[in-house]
Image (cartoon, rainbow, N blue to C red):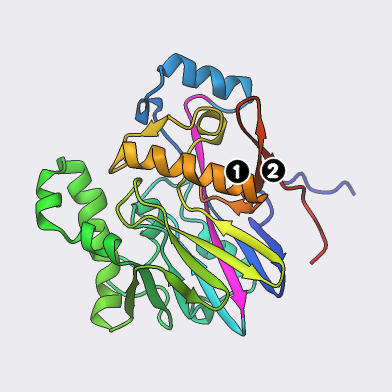
């Protein structure tokens, strides 16, 4: 009898070792979105860069989260779209299950920032914590910004509901439970140092994982569309709170990882999202890591 024709992908889970620490990429799915949010570049040029890379037009954006297994503890970096965005997102929980991880196993949730595709998985519609044993940890400026009534009043109606109110609703159960903590920088989890990368949001943060001689930077939303923003780092996104700051941070981070040969991972890289940058033709080029079955 012939084998059944597959109709679904295997689980979106991939493990990578960093010294004694294991980092697990977990896919939350993807989002299809408008080209209009890609700014500081002509739409036709942006579309051509995607076509040249054999990518969909309009853009398709991967959404990744990462587990950090360190010192007998387990952290989750970001938590995806939850159930409030497109049906193609919100896959984190089924993929955690496929990896043998229960939400109760996670003792720390590290937020890169509080945009809904990164934080809508924190709490359910009834206001219950989806990670009941976890401390929620983020940069102090991030928590403060999304709770700033003056900033919320300046936003358009969509952003007030989708970004400001959603962030408040997602975070509130952890604050009420005394399970939320903020930082300015420094070590925030065993082997993990917070690196403030402001611009995309005021408290946008990357997390540098180091063990022995090995390191990996989870850089959050330094880029959203790699085929465009790696060759054209001046390109910004409509949802950058400070586009000029986001552009400057992106250039600084590109320079750092290229100079240091540092491996990195991104929330909007094509799954599993691990790569390096090298200097080329006056800019940088991306070299995605090869898949490895070794641990």
Q: Is residue 129 magenta?
A: no
Count every numbered label the image shows and give the total: 2
Q: Residue at x 41, y 18 (%)?
A: 43
User: Could you say where residue 119 lies in the image, as x and y percent from the top left?
Assistant: 37, 60
Q: Is residue 286 above or below residue 182?
A: above
Query: What distance separates the C-alpha of mark 2 from that of mark 1?
Result: 9 Å
User: Could you say where residue 208 lies in the image, as x and y percent from the top left?
Assistant: 55, 63
Q: Residue at x 51, y 53 (%)?
A: 219
Query: Which stretch appears magenta?
Result: 57-70
Tell me where residue 132 sits by quadrant. Answer: bottom left
124 relative position to 165: left or right: right
Q: Is residue 160 visible?
A: yes
Determine which residue is flagged by label 2: 288
Q: Is residue 278 above or below residue 103?
A: above
229 relative position to 181: left or right: right
Determine which residue is flagged by label 1: 270
Residue nearest the observer in this picture, 19 or 101: 19
Q: Secondary structure at mark 2?
A: strand
Q: Residue at x 79, y 67 (%)?
A: 295
Q: Mark 2 against mark 1, which lies toward the viewer?
A: 2
User: Could you say where residue 117 lies in the image, as x and y percent from the top left?
Assistant: 40, 51
Residue nearest the observer in this picture, 72 or 89: 72
Image marks 2 and 1: residues in contact by CB distance under 8 Å: yes
């Amino acid at each position: 009898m012939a084998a059944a024709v597959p109709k679904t992908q295997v689980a979106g889970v991939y493990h990578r070792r960093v010294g004694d620490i294991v980092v697990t990429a977990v896919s939350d799915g993807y989002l299809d979105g408008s080209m209009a949010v890609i700014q500081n570049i002509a739409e036709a040029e942006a579309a051509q860069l995607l076509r040249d890379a054999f990518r969909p037009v309009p853009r398709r954006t991967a959404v990744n989260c990462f587990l950090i297994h360190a010192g007998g503890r387990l952290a989750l970096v970001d938590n995806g779209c939850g159930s409030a965005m497109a049906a193609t997102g919100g896959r984190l929980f089924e993929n955690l299950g496929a990896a043998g991880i229960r939400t109760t196993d996670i003792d720390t949730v590290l937020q890169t920032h509080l945009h809904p595709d990164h934080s809508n998985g924190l709490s359910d519609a009834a206001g219950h914590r989806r990670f009941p044993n976890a401390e929620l940890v983020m940069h102090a400026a991030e928590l403060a910004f999304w709770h700033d009534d003056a900033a919320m009043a300046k936003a358009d109606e969509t952003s007030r509901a989708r970004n400001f109110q959603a962030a408040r609703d997602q975070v509130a159960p952890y604050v009420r439970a005394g399970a939320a903590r903020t930082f300015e920088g420094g070590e925030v989890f065993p082997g993990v140092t917070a690196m403030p990368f402001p611009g995309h949001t005021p408290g946008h943060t990357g997390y540098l994982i180091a063990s022995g001689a090995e390191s990996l930077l989870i850089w959050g939303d330094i880029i959203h569309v790699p085929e465009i923003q790696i060759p054209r780092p001046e390109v910004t996104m409509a949802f950058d709170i400070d586009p000029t700051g986001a552009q400057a941070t992106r250039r600084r981070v590109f320079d750092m990882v290229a100079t240091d040969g540092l491996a990195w991972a991104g929330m909007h890289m094509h799954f599993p999202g691990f790569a390096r940058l090298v200097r080329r033709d006056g800019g940088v080029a991306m070299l995605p890591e090869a898949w490895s079955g070794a641990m």
